[in-house]
Image: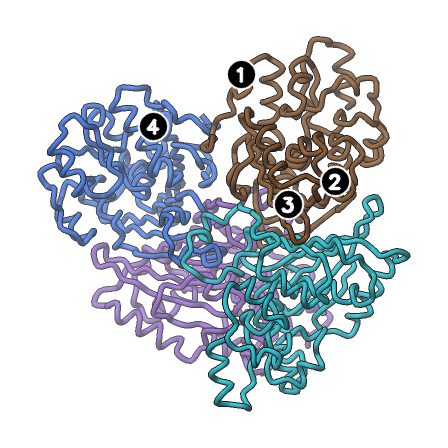
Chain colours: A cyan, B brown, C purple, D blue
Amino acid sequence: MAFVKKVLLKNKTLKIIDFSGDYRFDKVDMYEHYYNVEHIDQKNLNKFIYGLPEINRKSIAKSQYIANPGCYPTSIILPLYPLIQKKLIQLDNIIVDSKSGVSGAGKKANTNFLFTEITDSCYGYKAGVHRHQPEIIEKLGGNVNLIFSPHIIPATRGILSTIYCELNEKITYEDIVKTLKDYYSKEDFVNYVDFIPKTTDVTRTNNCFIHAHYNKQSNKLIIYSVIDNLMKGASSQAIQNMNIMLGLDETTGLMINNFYL
Amino acid sequence: MAFVKKVLLKNKTLKIIDFSGDYRFDKVDMYEHYYNVEHIDQKNLNKFIYGLPEINRKSIAKSQYIANPGCYPTSIILPLYPLIQKKLIQLDNIIVDSKSGVSGAGKKANTNFLFTEITDSCYGYKAGVHRHQPEIIEKLGGNVNLIFSPHIIPATRGILSTIYCELNEKITYEDIVKTLKDYYSKEDFVNYVDFIPKTTDVTRTNNCFIHAHYNKQSNKLIIYSVIDNLMKGASSQAIQNMNIMLGLDETTGLMINNFYL
Amino acid sequence: MAFVKKVLLKNKTLKIIDFSGDYRFDKVDMYEHYYNVEHIDQKNLNKFIYGLPEINRKSIAKSQYIANPGCYPTSIILPLYPLIQKKLIQLDNIIVDSKSGVSGAGKKANTNFLFTEITDSCYGYKAGVHRHQPEIIEKLGGNVNLIFSPHIIPATRGILSTIYCELNEKITYEDIVKTLKDYYSKEDFVNYVDFIPKTTDVTRTNNCFIHAHYNKQSNKLIIYSVIDNLMKGASSQAIQNMNIMLGLDETTGLMINNFYL
Amino acid sequence: MAFVKKVLLKNKTLKIIDFSGDYRFDKVDMYEHYYNVEHIDQKNLNKFIYGLPEINRKSIAKSQYIANPGCYPTSIILPLYPLIQKKLIQLDNIIVDSKSGVSGAGKKANTNFLFTEITDSCYGYKAGVHRHQPEIIEKLGGNVNLIFSPHIIPATRGILSTIYCELNEKITYEDIVKTLKDYYSKEDFVNYVDFIPKTTDVTRTNNCFIHAHYNKQSNKLIIYSVIDNLMKGASSQAIQNMNIMLGLDETTGLMINNFYL
């Protein structure tokens, strides 16, 4: 934030893709509450576009400044956005249980993430209070009652978000599947798949795989969404944004390891 | 089932602890539906007591025949039973997202569970249709709308069940904590803990650790419950049942590795 | 062998890269002894070139038929070949202790390779009697007293071969390093490195990293050699061979993930 | 060392089991060279007995002060000591290639031992210069030309030492096996086994399993020796020493998880 503020004073032509959360929010109070810090560059905040290409592609193409999305939000917004936009699911009871590999914590000298501590270990943390929760809610329109509940699993890469929600009246499971398939039918990286995806299905790719399941007895829709947290959840999504900003083919440099597509 | 049926015809004094699901259910139609098999020993069904000692201790002590609980149900019924019994939580919207190590699948020659397939991999399966779902619902009283959604994580041992539910009117988070603490205050193996437990906190023990968290914004109660699926979820729970049946000290042979208590 | 024999009768122009051990040996008796099978296509045996490009590049370029090397031998022959060719090390006492990830065993339904069996586990097998031992010895000239001792480690990919040998009279450690550096100075995939390499340094690449260490007290030369067993140890080496056979740039398709070079 | 020195001035009756290397050596110059520190308590050095019970049991029973052995040396001295004592193997060419789980590095905030760094990774380090090398050599009599070459594998617990050596003239493989079996026939924790042991065969026990293999072609004896580095390699061996010092049954508290014996 401090760096970007200084740079933008000096150089008007630079293109920026920011990996931090500093320019992801429209509402600065949300940011300040969850990040527990004062936003010192509010002037530039609205110049930044939230860099989720499948949802904001046109704005990204016209923008110089991109806020690259968080890893968890990418896996959650992609399946939910089309369903909420089309009013297919109820907004007052969405539960997101995410499982993440430990590379999301970065390469810090922290005994919590030693091999001996993580092996065979699984635990939840920050349910409802993680910094990614307001990012998810804002990008889904703001008026959703959603709880985001992350967990660490003994893996290096990968996020699986399991999403529980309910259908609106008269909406069927088929409507859900058709909407997701249609919305992503022309996308290179986001796909509705007919099987329950594993995190390893998208490892080292820029892909997001989505699958929905309906349980009649409990009237619950269960959505599985997987990404590689270091790729579509971070660096390769930044490259996708760069490609769009620069008018390049969006897949440039991103088809490596992409054996499914 | 076939074996037990034959044995019970010949020998009336034998004590039996059955690891299968065959004698866990009161309602045979539930069993037959989820296990997709005809129950051929209905005559003996009601002689078996569901072997969850913290809930059925007195019946277990008087019984000759025990149906040892499933691993997932153990981790889920233990935290929910006291809350439902005291009418503290709503029954119409309970979501259970469980994460299990792969030893739950047994030692079968199945390429799905090879080291190379499981490493770094996480996926869901059988949400709402797993055999343990009716077991959980029946033992919680039958009239709960609960979806059970299991996942495989790249670990050998351990189950973490993350449970999402809502408080009844006028019930506070403090009521929840107090109830769980009180209910398990005299138990050797089931404990309410003041931290979010990891699966590795109970590895190789007969313990179940429970922690509850309340998120005001979404009005959701989140309960974390961890067990070792091969211990409290299977073999050491059977030993606990045996100890009770035989009038031994309930902890006999079970305090190994029990460093917390 | 049976398939190749039949194919070669019908089609003289086909190019073949064989992954099996069937055409790797000059001496058929060696093959028959270690593979415990009769060689039924001896007529074609000498048409095949052993596909280790850094040693046989010219022959590969002129050949239609390649025997792709074994994974262990690739990691062992690459460091030893230049040293033996230049007579720098003693031939009568070479010990090779190799550590391999479990993907080398293939994707078979075998309980020995389940996640639960391999996690935290390490063991040796077939010291001195593994099929790769005669392959290593033959390609190093035949007159070496070398014992090959493989081990399984709880990893998916990667081979580390630790080689113990002794310098010839008047040969110095500097001679060893210079020879290895010179021999591989123009190679894209095989490199002498100034640090002790980890298996993960070459994961998902066609690289082999070699480092030598000398211990004065015991007069032992210790050589560390790492490859990815599925890449330089198998499929990407086959592509390298194909590139050479077809007159393509040798690195075509092989620089993916090659961050070091 | 500083602490022990001070304590022994004040209290003559205290019994001490020291986990460090400070009192393991007879020769202080060896210690000072490899540990790169001055020994400031040489006066007490010879009061300490090297705490390998299967070799020094009688001295341990009479001693107040024990130097608990290093983890690697325990796995290496146990198989070699009886063979060297009986003059069965050549002393001028012993190679020890050890593989250790990462718990040997302790619980330090070091990025080298993060889950993400260790997973799928294998590498050697400090061949011939590790602090455990002089400990091994001294306890084997001093006049052995032995190189100790340790490696890290992606496991939590366990050491496998693979030892390569040669038979003395007229000595047979049968002599080796008989000697090892006889020497350890009455031991509770050290066993010659008829299979190649895995590190997981002794996990969480005080056991050491030894197996020898002979390769005629190269005239090499290969010995596999496995321990749990945190148990027989550290804490449970200390308890075994304590039991002996206190005149208790040597197995007191140590048969937990000991399913083999």
* Mark 3 or 1: the one toward you: 3
Relative to D12, say whether D18 is above or below.
below
Q: What label does residue B90 carry, if any?
A: 2
Using the image as rendered, state which of residue C226 and residue A88 is in the foreground: A88
Mark 4 → mark 1, Cα distance in angstroms: 38 Å
Query: SS class of the residue under badge 1?
Result: loop
**Which kind of residue does numbered mark 4 sit on?**
Tyr
**Which kind of residue does numbered mark 1 sit on?**
Asp
Residue C244: tell me if it is visible.
no
* Mark 3 or 2: the one toward you: 2
Q: Which residue is mark 1?
A: B249
Mark 3 → mark 1, Cα distance in angstroms: 34 Å
Q: Which residue is mark 4?
A: D184
Q: Position of residue B251 (x, y in %)?
A: 53, 21
Q: What label does residue B222 carry, if any?
A: 3
Counting residues from the N terminus, which is met first, the one under dot 3 or under dot 1? Answer: 3
**Which kind of residue does numbered mark 3 sit on?**
Ile
Q: Chain of mark 2?
A: B
Counting residues from the N terminus, which is met first, the one under dot 1 or under dot 2? Answer: 2
The structure residue drawn at horizontal position 37% and vertical position 44%, both measured from the top left corner, is D161
Mark 3 → mark 2, Cα distance in angstroms: 13 Å
> Tags 1 and 2 in contact by the CB under 8 Å rule?
no
Q: Crowdedness of circle 2 by 10 Å Cα count: few (<14), some, many (20+)?
A: some
Mark 4 → mark 2, Cα distance in angstroms: 64 Å
Relative to A226, say whether B60 is above or below.
above
**Which kind of residue does numbered mark 2 sit on?**
Gln
Mark 3 → mark 4, Cα distance in angstroms: 55 Å
Q: Chain of mark 4?
A: D
* Mark 3 or 4: the one toward you: 3
Question: Same chain, marks 4 and 2?
Answer: no
Counting residues from the N terminus, which is met first, the one under dot 3 or under dot 2? Answer: 2
Question: Same chain, marks 3 and 4?
Answer: no
